[in-house]
Every structure is written in structure tokens, then in C-alpha cells.
Image (tube, rainbow, N blue to C red):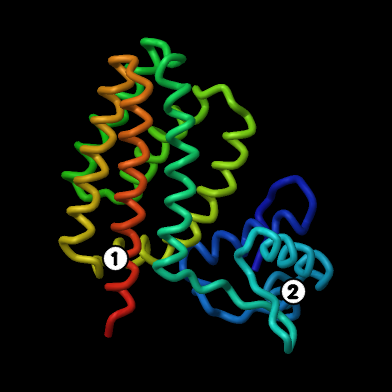
Amino acid sequence: MDLPSRTGPLFDQIYDILWSRILSGEIGHGTRVSDLEWSKKLDVSRTPVREAMRKLQQDGILLPLDRGGYEVRRMEAGDLLNLYRCRAALEALAVRDAATRLGERDIGRLRSLVDDAQTVLESDDLDRLFELNTAFHNMILQACGNVYLERLLSDLRRMILFARSSLMIAARDRQLGPAYKDHLNRVQNDHREILEAIVARDADAAAARMERHLFSTGDDMAQLAVGLRRP
């Protein structure tokens, strides 16, 4: 397997490869991984692989095993609930500040993202929909003007991305059914309501709606995760 042609430390390149394999489902939750196995697959020494895996352990993605090697963390419904509750509190703070800082051009961009997401939802392009919804949240976060909040949320949202990766794979394989489509419709409605509060420069309403939106999303994700594990 060839490494991607990019600059930077070798262990960072290996980290990116392992991370992408985990998100894609090629390395599933609960899978055992070892530096020996991946050093052979990547045709590199074990040291940079070990460093990459240690970094994934620090991120909370890999768990060390007593017999050596690591296991990809299994994320349960309760993990999703807790992650989204943390995110709700932080993004409510972000949108409260952003509501009075976003310029008219930024608000126009947010409106375009919401409108485009609705169109994409009807076309069933889930990857594009995820990109648009992520861009909506990112614009608000960047506008809040709090670099510490940005850093906290970046780490948290990365963990959420990992936690819900198996759900995204199931969604693309059409295993989640109408419940997931209902969830996506709720997300679009929530985003429009948050945008309306921002347009009105109502910081309190924007914060309340963001918190409610992410609590609801966490509940939906947890319920979908439980349903996915049923035989």
C-alpha cells in the first residue's frame, strides 16, 4: 500500500490513513489493530506506526489491549448522547456570540447553505448533505471570535464524527430506513430556525434553538444506533 504523496512527518501520514480507514468502516469499531500488521501493509518500520497509533489512543479512538496492540473503541448510544450534550452547550455559546457578529454577506451564505441542503436532501446525496450541514455549523463557529471554543469544538466534533461513522455507513447502504430521513428533515428545519434567529439578531433565541437542535440530534443518533444493533 502506497503512502499519500504529502509532506510532514511519516507518523502523521500513517495517522491520516488509519483515521480514514476507521471512518470508512474498513477498520470497524471493536477491531484489533497492531503496529506489526500495519507496518507490513504500509511497508514502513513499526516506529512511525506505533507513534500514529499512540496519537489515536490519545484522541480516544484506540484502546490499548493487555496482550498488546489496540482495539478500535466501540461507541454506544450513551456515548453519542453525552457527546452531543457537550456539543450543544458549546455551540449554544458559539451562536450566541456569532448572532451579533455575522455580517450580511455571511448571513446570505448561511441562507444559501440551508437552501442548498434542502435541495440536496430531496436528491438523496447524503455525502453532499453532510458537507453542507457541516459548513453551516463551521461558519457559525468561525464567526464567534473565540479561538478556545473553536479548539474545544473541533476536538469534540472529531470524536462525534468517529462515534457516528457506523451510522453514516449504514445510511449510505440504506440500512436505516425512514427514521433517518425523518431525522434529516428535522435537521434542516432546525437550521432554518437557527438562521431566522440570527437574521433577527436574537442571540438568546439562536442559542436556545442551537441547544435544542443538538440535543434532538443526539437523541436521534442514539436511537438509530440502538436500532442498528438489533438483529
Q: What residue lies at 25% left-to-right and 70% top-to-bottom?
A: 175
Percent x, y of residue 23: 49, 62
- In what quadrant of the picture does the C terminus appear? bottom left
The residue carrying pointer 1 sits among few (fewer than 14), some (14 to 19) or many (20 or more) residues within 10 Å by Cα, namely: some
Q: Is residue 1 above or below residue 208?
A: below
The mark total stands at 2
Residue closer to the observer: 4 or 31: 31
- Which quadrant of the structure image shows residue 211? top left
Q: Is residue 50 above or below residue 90?
A: below
The residue carrying pointer 2 sits among few (fewer than 14), some (14 to 19) or many (20 or more) residues within 10 Å by Cα, namely: some
Residue closer to the observer: 89 or 228: 89
Residue closer to the observer: 93 or 28: 93
Q: Amino acid at mark 1?
A: Gln
Cβ–Cβ below 8 Å for labels 1 and 2? no
Residue closer to the observer: 218 or 24: 218
- Which quadrant of the structure image shows residue 214? top left
Percent x, y of residue 55: 72, 60
Give the residue pinned by disc 2: 39
**Element carrying mark 1:** helix
